[in-house]
Amino acid sequence: MEKFSFKELVVWQKAMDFADECLQITEAIKGHFRLCEQLEACSCSVP
């Protein structure tokens, strides 16, 4: 029986790309710290 990795799922890969993009955006935003924290938390919880 072959082992299956969730990292092979396209949906997981796209969710990780989305999380990376969200983190890049929040790093560029000055101020609105609570909004940035919430965006970081929710985007990382998707994958």
Image: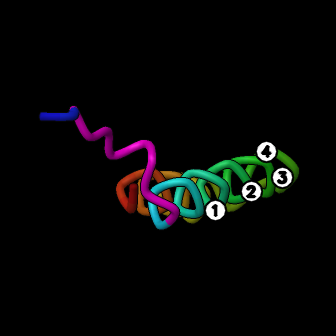
Asked if the residue under mark 1 is in contact with the one under mark 2, i.e. CB atoms within 8 Å, the reply is yes
Q: Earlier in the sequence, mark 2 or mark 3?
A: 2
Asked if the residue under mark 3 is in contact with the one under mark 1, i.e. CB atoms within 8 Å, the reply is no
Q: CA distance from mark 2 to mark 1?
A: 5 Å
Front label number (4 vs 1): 1
Asked if the residue under mark 2 is in contact with the one under mark 4, i.e. CB atoms within 8 Å, the reply is no
Residue carrying label 3:
30
Q: Is residue 34 visible?
A: no
In this rendering, position of residue 20 left or right of residue 43: right
Q: Earlier in the sequence, mark 1 or mark 3?
A: 1
- The secondary structure type at the circle numbered 2 is helix
Q: What is the number of the mark on residue 27?
A: 4
Identify the amino acid type marked 4: Glu
Q: Residue at x 21, y 34 (%)?
A: 2
Colour convention of the picture:
rainbow
In this rendering, position of residue 2 left or right of residue 21: left
Q: CA distance from mark 3 to mark 4?
A: 8 Å
- The secondary structure type at the circle numbered 3 is loop
Q: CA distance from mark 2 to mark 3?
A: 16 Å
- The secondary structure type at the circle numbered 1 is helix
Q: What is the number of the mark on residue 34?
A: none
Q: Earlier in the sequence, mark 4 or mark 1?
A: 1
Residue 33 position within the rendered picture, expressed as x and y whole percent measured from the top left? 62, 53
Q: CA distance from mark 4 to mark 2?
A: 10 Å
Using the rendered view, name the quadrant where residue 36 is placed.
Answer: bottom right
Q: What is the number of the mark on residue 18?
A: 1
Which residues are drawn in magenta?
3-10
Front label number (1 vs 3): 1
Q: What is the number of the mark on residue 21?
A: 2
Identify the amino acid type marked 2: Glu
Front label number (2 vs 3): 2
